Amino acid sequence: MITLKSPKEIQKIRKSGKVLAECLLSLEEVIRPGISTWDIDRIAHEFITAHHGIPSCLGYCGYPNATCTSVNEVVIHGIPDRKKILNEGDIISVDICVTLDGYVSDSTRTYEVGQVSPEVHKLNVVTRESLYLGIEGARKKNARISDIASAVFRHASTENGYGVVRDYTGHGVGYDVHEDPEVPNFLSPMIPNPRLKPGMVLAVEPMVNMGTWKIRNMRDGWTVKTADGKPACHWEHTIAITEDGVEILTEI
C-alpha cells in the first residue's frame, strides 16, 4: 500500500535528507586510494550520529553496518570490510539511509577513486545523468512510475548500451527504508504503474552495469555483483511529489 506523506512529514524527511546529503558530500574528502571501506563506514556513521541521526541500514533485516560500500563490480549491498582497501582507478558506490526524528531518507553516490579509466568515468556520468532524467520524468504532467523508468532506461540502455539492473528497483521511503511502490529502471507490465500524487516520497535509484544487466547474489546474503564481472554504478535520490512539483530531498 502506498502511503502519502503530509507537508509536515515531508519537511521531516527533508531534514533527514539534508543530513544525508551533507554526509555524502563530506566523504569526498576521505575517499582516496588506501582507505578501507570499513573506515568509510565508520566515518559516515560518526557523521550521522553527530548530527542526531540514526544510520537506518544498521541492523535492517540483520545488515551489519551503517552503509553499503560497493566497489567496482559490486552493484549494491557491499559490506564494509577492514581488508577491502581502495586502489587508484576503483569506483565505490556508498548507499546510506538516515533516520531523523523517525523519518527516513535514502541516497547513493558513486565516487571515483583517483584517476579512473575513460570507460568507467563515462559509466559513472551516464548513471548520474540517468538519475536526473528519471527525476525529470516524474515532473511530467500526470506522470506515472513508468515515466521515471522509461527515462532511465532510454538514456542508460537504449542510448548508451549499458545493462540496467532488473532484479532490484527503487522504492517508496519515509516511514521506513523500503515502502511501496516499486520504482523500476525499466518498463515491465508485471510491475504496478501508479500515477504520481502529491505526498508520495520515492527513492529513485538507477543501477547501471557496463556489461550485462544480469547479476549474481553472493553467499553472504547481501553482496550483489555483476554477472560478467564488469563495473557497476549506482546513484540515488529521495524525491517528494508535492502540490508545487517534484523536490529532491537529498541534495544540498
Image: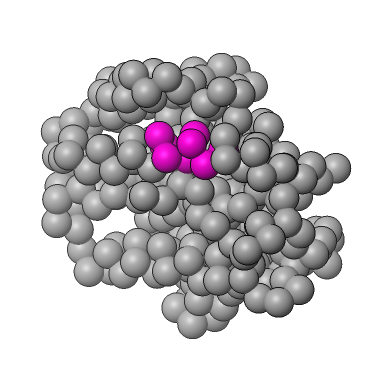
Image-based side of 218 in relation to 48, left or right: right
Q: Is the magenta stretch mostly helix, strand or loop?
A: helix
Give the magenta range.
Answer: 13-20
179 in relation to 155, above or below: above
Task: Please name the residue shown 62% across and 65% down the image.
Answer: 245
202 in relation to 53, above or below: below
Q: How many labels does the image show?
A: 0
The answer to if 46 sits in the magenta stretch is: no
Task: Please name the residue shown 56% across and 23% down the image.
Answer: 101
Image-based side of 33 in relation to 196, left or right: left
- Asked which quadrant contains residue 84, the reply is top left
Residue 75: x %, y % from top left: 47, 47
Task: Please name the residue shown 24% across and 52% down the image.
Answer: 112
The N terminus is located in which quarter? top right
Residue 94: x %, y % from top left: 38, 40
Question: Is residue 139 visible in the rendered structure shown here?
Answer: yes
